[in-house]
């Protein structure tokens, strides 16, 4: 969809919000959803005129990120400048502001070939007659011809480069991909709409209070429209987590704060109950010099189910069905004991350049099953004289594998001690993950002040992921060529990020998560 430049700019302004004037304080499934057709798989709604705390927080975030001290004036200036450059000037204050309402929305009716199609843009109007005058003026001054049309008593204009349909439906400006989408929206306005569906109402009711914008996804519908093409392993992971993707829905809300931006997710688990638990203790125990880390609970259960599935199905041309666990046990590797002893899993990354980059997967264990399995694997590899494999010496069980062609100049290392296994790139990074928190091995993430602020920003939500903005940017700066104009342009915004914090919880059949972008 490529509507006339001014109308496109108006749509963009609707999505990023124009914090001017007075108005609502948050979005939560308002009347704009009444123009979205039923079973719309993607629906985005935003506040055009935030007020009070939402307005001040939005402007504060814009100033911290982009140095913009008045976001509303900036958006209006950019819109008018774009229209002027296209030879079609507009005065926002006289032509748009008098009728511009509180909310706007964008919907997509289909997913085809991995692209969202059949787009509609809905902008609330406080004066439909003035909105119609605006449309008539813009169509008249357009370089591309338009023609008049009508559907169910609703007049519209259709034309331009892509035959977009534009008109006023009730109290809304509607810009549609084509006449078919316009007609669908008109039909929806008669009552059979997304807003009338219980699935949408229940999902959007979980959206965060005080949000600037909400995104609704019908996950099952998107899977259906993609031809059911979801990776079998990904589907199994979701099912293991208690999620039936064919029936699930999700909502994401953008909630600005004075020194952070929160993206809050909620997902209906389609009648399933996800596993509970948290891995924040493991995350906090990862090495203190890590610039990023992530941890999950219940990892052993997932491994156990994966092993059972792999054993049952076998590996084509390699291992017959129901022989994997039996065969490895005969070689001294007990997969069931290994999975039973595993608890949580965490991964971290360290370094500020390509040469210093490293990291490891850290697994917490209970009992001796995992440590014994690592020792057995090391013995097996040594006995069959696998090239590049070297056993670890000293007080750690494990081994390293060196292959410069596939791994570069650092080995892959597997190391274990009581209560912990680390699998990492490079010996120093692996051992730091194995020994993090020991008195002689340096600080942990929980002793990093930036990490502490990330934990505090999540409130009651347990932290599951963390990245320190400045450290991650230093690494990216060393890896990305200096002549990359896109990255150079983005750096001035990335510099404002102090940390990223991710947390999640489940309760009954609802999973919620928060991504906090902490700002300097």
Image (cartoon, helix red, strand yellow):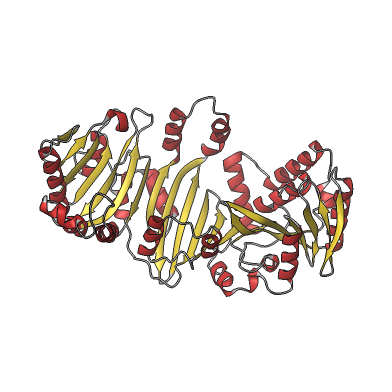
Residue at 39% across / 52% down in the picture? 455
Extreme front residue here? 317
Q: Residue at x 61, y 45 (%)?
A: 62
- Position of residue 404 in the picture relative to residue 99 (left or right): left
- Residue 35, picture quadrant: bottom right
Q: Is residue 507 above or below residue 484?
A: below
Residues 312 and 47: in front is 312
Q: Position of residue 502 (x, y in %)?
A: 43, 52
- Does residue 180 lie above or below 409 as drawn? below
Q: Is residue 38 above or below residue 329?
A: below
Nearer to the camera, 324 or 242:
324
Front-most of 393 and 17?
A: 393
Query: Is residue 44 something one can see in this rendering?
Result: no
**Residue 360 seen by the camera:** yes
Question: Which residue is located at x 56 percent, y 55 percent?
Answer: 254
- Could you say where residue 78 lies in the image, as x and y percent from the top left? 73, 41
**In the orientation shown, which residue stands out farthest toward the top?**
483
Q: Is residue 68 left or right of residue 174?
A: left
Relative placement, left or right, of 213 versus 291 is right
Q: How many marks?
A: 0
From the top left corner, tell me how far across and down residue 135 is, in percent.
Answer: 84, 54
Residue 343 in percent (x, y) is at 24, 57
Q: Is 280 drawn above or below residue 474 in the view shown?
A: below
């Amino acid at each position: 969809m490529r509507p006339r430049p001014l109308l496109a700019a108006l749509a963009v302004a609707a999505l990023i919000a124009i914090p001017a004037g007075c108005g609502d304080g948050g979005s939560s499934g308002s009347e704009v959803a009444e123009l979205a057709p039923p079973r719309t798989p993607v629906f985005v709604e935003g506040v055009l005129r935030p007020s009070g705390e939402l307005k001040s927080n939005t402007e504060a975030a814009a100033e911290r990120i982009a140095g913009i001290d008045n976001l509303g004036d900036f958006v209006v200036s950019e819109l008018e400048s774009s229209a002027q450059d296209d030879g079609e000037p507009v005065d926002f204050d006289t032509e748009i502001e008098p009728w511009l309402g509180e909310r706007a929305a964008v919907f997509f009716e289909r997913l085809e070939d991995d692209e969202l199609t059949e787009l509609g843009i809905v902008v609330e109007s406080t004066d439909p007659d003035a909105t119609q005058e605006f449309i008539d003026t813009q169509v008249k001054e357009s370089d591309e011809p338009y023609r008049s049309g009508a559907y169910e008593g609703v007049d519209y204009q259709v034309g331009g480069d892509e035959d977009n349909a534009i008109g006023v439906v009730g109290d809304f400006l509607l810009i549609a991909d084509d006449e078919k989408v316009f007609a669908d929206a008109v039909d929806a306005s008669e009552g059979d709409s997304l807003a009338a569906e219980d699935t949408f109402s229940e999902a959007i009711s979980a959206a965060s209070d005080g949000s600037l914008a909400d995104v609704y996804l019908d996950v099952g519908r998107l899977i259906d429209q993609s031809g059911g093409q979801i990776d079998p392993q990904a589907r199994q992971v979701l099912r293991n987590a208690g999620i039936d993707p064919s029936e699930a829905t999700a909502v994401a809300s953008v909630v600005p704060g004075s020194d952070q931006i929160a993206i809050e997710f909620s997902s209906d688990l389609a009648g399933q109950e996800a596993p509970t638990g948290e891995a924040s203790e493991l995350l906090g125990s990862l090495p203190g010099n890590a610039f990023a880390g992530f941890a999950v609970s219940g990892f052993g259960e997932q491994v156990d189910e994966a092993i059972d599935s792999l054993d049952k199905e076998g590996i084509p041309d390699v291992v017959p069905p129901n022989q994997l666990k039996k065969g490895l046990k005969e070689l001294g590797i007990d997969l069931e004991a290994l999975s039973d002893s595993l608890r949580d899993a965490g991964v971290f990354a360290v370094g500020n350049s390509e040469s210093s980059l490293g990291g490891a997967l850290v697994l917490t264990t209970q009992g001796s099953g995992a440590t014994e399995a690592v020792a057995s694997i090391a013995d097996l590899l040594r006995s069959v004289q696998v090239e590049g494999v070297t056993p670890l010496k000293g007080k750690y069980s494990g081994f390293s594998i060196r292959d410069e062609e596939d791994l570069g100049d650092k080995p892959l290392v597997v190391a274990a001690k009581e209560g912990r296994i680390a699998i990492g790139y490079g010996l120093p990074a692996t051992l730091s993950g194995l020994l993090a928190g020991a008195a002689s091995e340096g600080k942990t993430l929980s002793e990093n002040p930036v990490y502490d602020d990330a934990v505090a920003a999540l409130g009651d939500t347990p932290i599951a992921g963390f990245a320190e903005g400045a450290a991650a940017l230093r690494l990216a700066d060393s890896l990305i060529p200096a002549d990359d104009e896109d990255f150079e342009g983005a750096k001035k915004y990335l510099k404002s990020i102090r940390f990223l914090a991710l947390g999640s919880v489940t309760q009954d059949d609802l999973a919620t998560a928060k991504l906090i972008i902490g700002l300097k």
